[in-house]
Image (cartoon, rainbow, N blue to C red):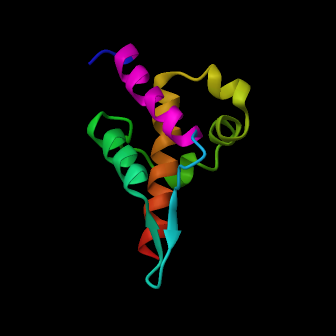
């Protein structure tokens, strides 16, 4: 899969996340349980190389990470590598929430 195809496939999830019926997950007696759609997105990111080997807790503290996280303008100009780092942080943090 080319980089463009990878971005296109990833972009298809934006429709899902933007829909009024999308649910990230819900809290139950054990902790936070992700919805099936959220789990499918996470699997897609792992399977297609969007989750990278990265010291993500450290990278998340950088100006680059915080600017990408906080600014739509900067995120729109991000490289695929920067998006992969940002997705890695978001997905790994989410997994920690689930384990807690």
- In this rendered view, identify the residue nearer to me: 66 or 18: 18
In the image, the segment drawn in magenta is 4-18
On screen, residue 60 versus residue 1, left or right, reads: right
Residue at position x 48%, y 79% in the image? 28
On screen, residue 97 versus residue 74, left or right, reads: left
**Is 98 within the magenta?**
no
Residue at position x 50%, y 49% in the image? 89
Q: Position of residue 87 (x, y in %)?
A: 48, 41
Q: Position of residue 75 (x, y in %)?
A: 64, 28
Would you identify the image quadrant in which residue 67 lies?
top right
- In this rendered view, identify the residue nearer to me: 49 or 15: 15
Q: Position of residue 44 (x, y in %)?
A: 32, 40
How many marks can you see? Answer: 0
**Is 16 within the magenta?**
yes
On screen, residue 44 versus residue 16, left or right, reads: left
- Up/down of 13 relative to 35, above or below: above
On screen, residue 70 versus residue 87, left or right, reads: right
The N terminus: image quadrant: top left
Q: Position of residue 12 (x, y in %)?
A: 44, 28
Principal secondary structure, stretch drawn in magenta: helix
Residue at position x 46%, y 51% in the image? 91
- In this rendered view, identify the residue nearer to me: 88 or 53: 88
- Up/down of 34 relative to 70, above or below: below
The residue lying furthest to the bottom in this view is 29
């Amino acid at each position: 899969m080319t980089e463009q195809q990878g971005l296109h496939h990833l972009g298809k999830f934006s429709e899902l996340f933007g829909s009024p019926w999308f649910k990230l997950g819900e809290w139950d007696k054990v902790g936070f349980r992700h919805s099936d759609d959220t789990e499918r997105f996470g699997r897609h990111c792992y399977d297609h190389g969007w989750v990278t080997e990265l010291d993500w807790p450290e990278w998340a503290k950088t100006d680059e990470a915080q600017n990408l996280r906080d600014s739509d303008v900067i995120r729109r100009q991000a490289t695929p590598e920067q998006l992969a780092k940002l997705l890695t942080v978001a997905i790994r943090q989410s997994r920690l929430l689930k384990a807690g």
